[in-house]
Amino acid sequence: MTTVTNLGFPRIGAKRELKRALEAFWAGESSAASLQDTARGLRARHWTLQREAGVDVPPSNDFSFYDQVLDTAFLVDAIPARYRALADADPLAGYFALARGVQRDGYDLHALEMTKWFDTNYHYLVPELQAGQGFALRGDKPLAEYREAKALGIETRPVLLGPVSFLLLSKTVDGSPALDLLDALLPVYAELLAGLKAAGAQWVQLDEPVLVQDLDDSARAAFEHAYAVLSGVPRPKVLLATYFGALEDNLGLAAALPVDGLHVDLVRAPEQLDAVLSVLPPDRVLSAGLVNGRNIWRTHLDNALVLARYAHGHLGDRLWLAPSCSLLHSPVDLALETRLDDELRGWLAFSTQKLQELRLLADALDARPHAEAGLAASRARIESRRQSPRVHKPAVAARLAGLTAADAQRHSPYPQRHLAQAGALKLPRFPTTTIGSFPQTLDVREARARNKSGKLSDADYDAFLAAQTEHCVRVQEQIGLDVLVHGEFERNDMVEYFGEQLDGFAFTRNGWVQSYGSRCVKPPVIFGDVTRPRPMTVRWSQYAQSLTDRPMKGMLTGPVTVLQWSFVRDDQSRADTCRQIALALRDEVLDLEAAGIGVIQIDEPAIREGLPLRRAQWREYLDWAVEAFRISASGVRDATQIHTHMCYSEFNDIIHSVAAMDADVISIETSRSRMELLDAFVRFQYPNEIGPGVYDIHSPRVPDKEEMLALLRKAAEVLRPEQIWVNPDCGLKTRGWKETRAALEALVAAARELRAENADANAA
Ligand code: GLN
Ligand code: ZN
């Protein structure tokens, strides 16, 4: 019988039970014991559910209170000194201090830095290491969870982040190579593996996803060394798991490591199957990742079966079937989506359904009689999707086919546009603006919720939003900002707001995926060709403009960001889906312009996170991403000013593409790094205008005028004065009004002072 296995199951719970339990515990409303109860209940439910779906060996230790990388750091005692006292006194409190920081009982500790887990929207905590440090086994989480399942009668495969990936995902505070710590770390892994073997574990899964990235010689050597050492100790059989891409040049390395099985991602990289089969040693298990662990689509089982049969022909029982990666990145159960229409629901599969698909594939391989009916039913759904007029709209295809280079090109080059815009907008030097949103107070969120639940009529909600917008405009006028915004009070989320108004998008009720810790996101599902039935933002921008003589900036979410933060189609390229969104936004931009909006910002905070894991693929991605932005922005007249915004500051390696977007003005986050991150723009001699953020909106702290002026002077040393805008780092939606007002007053004062200094310098 063909074995079905799984690499990891979402831990948050179908209804986000873990989120609720965590937040109640953090708020002091529930005890550690009750948090542990919820966790145990979820683990038991998930193991049972996986068994019922047909998984032979479900994973254990895939559960986490916050993050699996943090769990690993904690497990090997990679705890920076400042957290140690707390972690020793109260392990759970110490763990959450690393995760979220702590400010009580005499402790004042920041959280560890957080960053994206490969190219997913999951964020992990970056372990902090130091040259010469030691490691030790702390606690027994993997063992305890293995035993917990065993007590329920379920044999699991404990999952551990492998030692090389762990080190490469960490950072060292002293800049020393993290891999120098490998020899100190390996005994801890050896001890852990021995413990798992003693507890009866048959297999253990070591995740080494860095194997799908470009590795240097020291990393390759580290793999060879680490796995040679670990093969010499008493341990369960080891499944080495790679995912999120092809092994490519690391295939030989991975296949030669002394382990007992290899997991490969055949969804992202089906083409690697032949190469894998040809180098896999004869005693090895191959775990074939055939069902996409990162999306919500039903699998094309006929295609998957072709690969499975081919591999089965070579391997027989040494072939296991698995999702491409942990199901952490897919929601839990489609059965809860009672509000989706049947047709659309028929096209989808969440984690639970994906495991059932794997069972069906295995049964088909084993020629079980009932499998044919299952495959036929699945085929019918796939066919319905392929032919649905909800998915395929000839007009969209025609428009895409008709795109020319001119559609992605402003009429004139930037210098001419700059003159036209200067004439139209008449802004002072160092113009001030904000990034779009103003405080989303409890009032605003409550009104939205009440309108959604029918307790507040549309007319009353509208009047409420109008009042908020007007108030926001007046405040900005009083503060003296030059380019105003309407405040975005009508928006729940910067992608959802647009997705809800575009055709081709669907929204789930419980399609949650963990973003970090207790935070989950519910990405829209882009299922069909994207069209814009009617203008989406014109009304509020136009209304806000009618209230003031100052320029009102229109505010849109860019095509790459909409794509990046949604579940996207798997039946056409990401580039094409992105172009469709870009065309819908282009129409919106033109409608805004026609409605008298002369400044339009198209936010693209997600451009950088879309970068492929392999450098060799960056160019292609950046080319279509930049093109999509330009399609959305390029329909307007020279005098209409296009802004873009990105919420980070690492531009060194993508600065050419950022410049190629050809926005008239870009705003970026720079206040925390004290402008150092402007470097890329300076070295590259960025030609257009730029607003380096001078107010860190991630903190309630109110910076004063001098502080912002100092940042601006630094910027003015390296940029031309006519290039510089003055603005915060990002939108203000998470801030309160009081601090926002104070900070923006200081910001305007700083800009005025810089103007005066600059005028004096010119006069002299
Ligand atoms: N315009 C958005 C806002 O101000 C931008 C948010 C973002 O960059 N993430 O909220
Ligand atoms: Zn931002």
Image: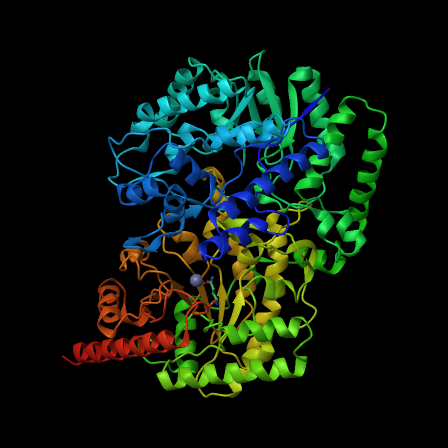
Q: Residue visible at 39% across and 78% down?
A: 422
Q: Relative to 632, does residue 625 appear above or below in the rendering?
A: above
Residue 581 drawn at (x, y percent):
61, 59
From the viewer's side, name the closer residue of 706 and 643: 706
Measured as percent of width and height from the top left, residue 450 is found at 63, 74
| Residue 536 seen in this snapshot | no
Q: Position of residue 733 (x, y in %)?
A: 46, 69
How many numbered marks does the figure carry? 0
- The quarter of the image holding the C terminus is bottom left
Pick whichever, 464 or 659, lies toward us: 464
Place residue 130 in its image quadrant.
Answer: top left
In depth, the one of 201 and 172 nearer the eye is 201
Quadrant where the N terminus sits is top right
Q: Quick one: 352 or 581, which is closer to the camera?
A: 352
Residue 274's quadrant in the figure? Answer: top right
Q: In the image as oriented, which residue stretches furthest toward the left?
A: 764
Q: Left or right of 437: which side holds 18?
A: right
Give the quadrant of residue 341: bottom right
Indicate how the structure is coloured in the image. rainbow
Q: Residue at x 73, y 23 (%)?
A: 309
**Figure check: 262 above or below 569:** above
Q: Is residue 79 visible?
A: yes
Locate residue 124, reporting x and y percent: 44, 44
